[in-house]
Amino acid sequence: MQEPVVKAILFDLDGTLVDTIEDIRRSLAHALAGEDLSPPSATLTQHVVGRGLSNALKGVLAWYDHRVDEQRFDQLYQDMLHYYREHFAVYSHPYEGVVELLGHLHRQGFLIGIFSNKEDGLTKRIVSTLFPDFPFSWVRGMQDGFPRKPDRSGIDYFCRKVGLHPHEVLYVGDSEVDWQTARNADCPHVLVSWGFRPKEELLALQDAVVVDTIHELEDAIYGIQREGSEKQS
């Protein structure tokens, strides 16, 4: 009997496992209030997230065509972070079916991890609050000196930690950043359409595997297993 092709699954956090958009939107609004700017919409917030909170704030300021110098931006960013750290899971919640899926995959023997562009401390607090009993193999957000996605460094680090090769790791996300991360690491991927990017944008990505439901995601995971096993045989 051959070994499974995919032995571990790394998930993006925001827009993939957890709907965090309202807490992020309110944190952005808190920072923007310091510049007398109106709160961003949920749609705008979804558009700017994916490359870390600092870039999200830059994206919103650019959308408003509102310029600030570097020192002022740093102040606004710290205001945003302070608010978010105090309100990181007021409205955030796992998407329907996610908890059950994670449990099923874990029982099937997959190693399960999370790799996010959100600040590492916030990532870990959100995960421990919303998934208090799940035995993740690895949870990592952004740390100083650690490249952001779509750089492949995070996946390579995870592979070294658990003793796997990138082709044995499936990366699941909801954005072009996650798609590019998987391509850079030369690992299989699945993108979910319930997250923060319109489905048509995901489908426009070359060879993107896109699913619409939790059941389709689970089917896609086992489909990748079968396809890889057939290639080995």
Image (cartoon, rainbow, N blue to C red):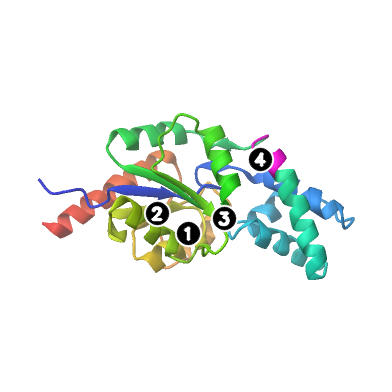
Compared across the picture, whether 38 is left or right of 104 comes to right
Single out the mark in the foreground, 3 or 2.
2
Say whether residue 179 is visible: yes
The answer to whether 176 is drawn above or below residue 20 in the figure is below
Label 4, label 3: how far apart the Cα atoms are = 21 Å
Q: Marks 3/1: CA distance?
A: 11 Å
Between discs 4 and 3, the one toward the N terminus: 4
Give the residue displayed 34% in from the left and 58% down from the top.
Answer: 188
Marks 2 and 1 close (CB-CB < 8 Å): yes
Q: Tell me if 187 is positioned left or right of 78 in this view.
A: left
Q: Mark 4 and mark 1: span between their CA atoms?
A: 22 Å
- Residue 154 is drawn in which quadrant? bottom left
- Name which of mark 3 and mark 1 comes first in the sequence: 1
Residue at left offset 78%, top offset 51%: 79
**Residue 81 image offset from top left, x and y in percent:** 71, 50
Q: Which mark is residue 197?
A: 3
Q: Are marks 2 and 4 in contact (CB under 8 Å)?
A: no
Q: Nearer the viewer, mark 4 or mark 3?
A: 4
The residue pinned by badge 2 equals 171
Image quadrant where residue 21 sits: top right
Residue ID at (72%, 59%)? 57
Q: Amino acid at mark 1?
A: Asp
Report the span colored magenta: 85-90
